[in-house]
Image (cartoon, coloured by chain):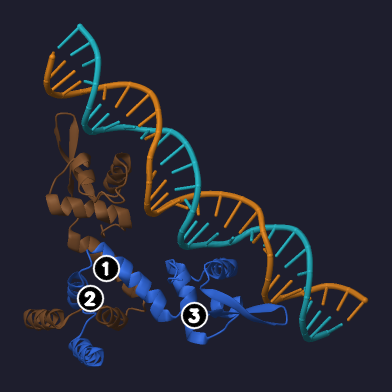
Chain colours: A blue, B brown, C orange, D cyan
DNA sequence: TTAAGACTACGACAGATGTAGTAGAGCGAT
DNA sequence: ATCGCTCTACTACATCTGTCGTAGTCTTAA
């Protein structure tokens, strides 16, 4: 039941599905940037594995091609990754924040937005 | 030169080294919680692999036991992980922030601290 | 109707990871 | 000197990941 652990490449395939919605292997493959694009069958293998993990399902068939759709949300999949990393860091989020700030990935806007979100959450929890 | 990619278990071994400073395999092994503690030789294998990756070095020998010490900092190793995850999320830190807030891992204090750190960084960069 | 393409379903394989056993050398207490 | 315990240095192996190749089936345009 918990979101299965997806590998990096599997995540990239899921990303394509989340972006475009139900797609064929071909459509997913086409979404990879020319540079470093994996072989068609490599993507196909990923889709099969995702299906085995229950992260994807065959939605329908168009002519002889299967159309796959995501069965786990982007949030659930990403959460799984973040939780794993956080656990690795002793559950502390501070190191993550600090790194994002030092590498310029986190701007003041981001912080302001986070603050707003936190306030909202606090209000709703009450 | 860039901090090598360390696996989860390798990170846990490094964590022991960062905490205790130069240690023998035995001392590292002893730091794992009884629950789910890997075999002594499993830890030993990790240390050897870390040595091969250049993340650890034999500092000295006490009687017949090797004492290993970390050659990469905790920050560098963690950064590597965060960068990887961020890349997987399209380089956006927002999803990470949102998740940490929603799971209660990020408090208002953390945000305030982040804000302060960011301001400091901005001042110094100038 | 038929030949070119597109797809599917598998099979393979190398490298990374987690996990651990074994043989034998070295140290220390008797 | 020597017996037991500790460590080291290997070896092994099952999974997971990333990467494809191939054989054979379907579709479809000429």
Q: Judging from the image, what secondary structure is the residue with disc 3 in?
A: helix
Q: Are marks 1 and 2 in contact (CB under 8 Å)?
A: yes
- Asked where in the image residue A80 lies, by quadrant, the reply is bottom left
- Judging by the rendered image, the residue that carries numbered circle 3 is A16
Give me the residue at 6% from left, 83% from top: B123
Residue D25 against residue B55 in the figure, above or below: below
Residue B71 appears in view: no
Q: Quadrant of the C terminus of chain A?
A: bottom left
Q: Judging from the image, what secondary structure is the residue with disc 1 in?
A: helix
Q: Chain of mark 2?
A: B
Q: Is residue A60 left or right of residue B76?
A: right
Give me the residue at 36% from left, 77% from top: B89
Mark 1 residue crowding within 10 angstroms, few (<14) / some (14–19) / many (20+): some
Badge nearest the viewer, 3 or 1: 1
- Judging by the rendered image, the residue that carries numbered circle 1 is A86
Q: In this rendering, do the residues under marks 3 and 1 share a single chain?
A: yes
Among the two numbered marks 3 and 1 on one chain, the one whose residue lies closer to the N terminus: 3
Q: Is residue B52 left or right of residue C4?
A: left
- Judging by the rendered image, the residue that carries numbered circle 2 is B105
Badge nearest the viewer, 1 or 2: 2
Q: Judge by depth and name the residue closer to the eye, B83 or B95.
A: B95
Residue A62 against residue A123 in the figure, above or below: above
Q: Judge by depth and name the residue closer to the eye, A30 or A20.
A: A20
Give the x, y percent position of residue A4: 45, 68
Q: CA distance from mark 3 to mark 2?
A: 29 Å
Name of the residue lying farthest toward the front = A126
Q: Are marks 3 and 1 in contact (CB under 8 Å)?
A: no
Q: CA distance from mark 1 to mark 2?
A: 9 Å
Give the x, y percent position of residue B95: 32, 81
Q: In this rendering, do the residues under marks 3 and 2 share a single chain?
A: no
Q: Is residue B99 left or right of residue A16?
A: left
């Amino acid at each position: 039941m918990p979101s299965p652990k997806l590998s990096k490449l599997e995540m990239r395939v899921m990303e394509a599905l989340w972006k475009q919605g139900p797609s064929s292997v071909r459509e997913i493959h086409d979404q990879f940037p020319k540079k470093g694009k994996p072989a068609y069958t490599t993507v196909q293998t990923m889709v099969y594995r995702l299906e085995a993990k229950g992260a994807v399902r065959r939605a329908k068939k168009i002519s002889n091609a299967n159309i796959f759709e995501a069965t786990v949300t982007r949030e659930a999949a990403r959460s799984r990754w973040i939780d794993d990393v956080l656990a690795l860091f002793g559950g502390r989020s501070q190191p993550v924040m600090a790194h994002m700030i030092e590498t310029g990935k986190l701007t003041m806007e981001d912080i302001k937005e986070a603050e707003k979100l936190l306030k909202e959450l606090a209000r709703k929890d009450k």
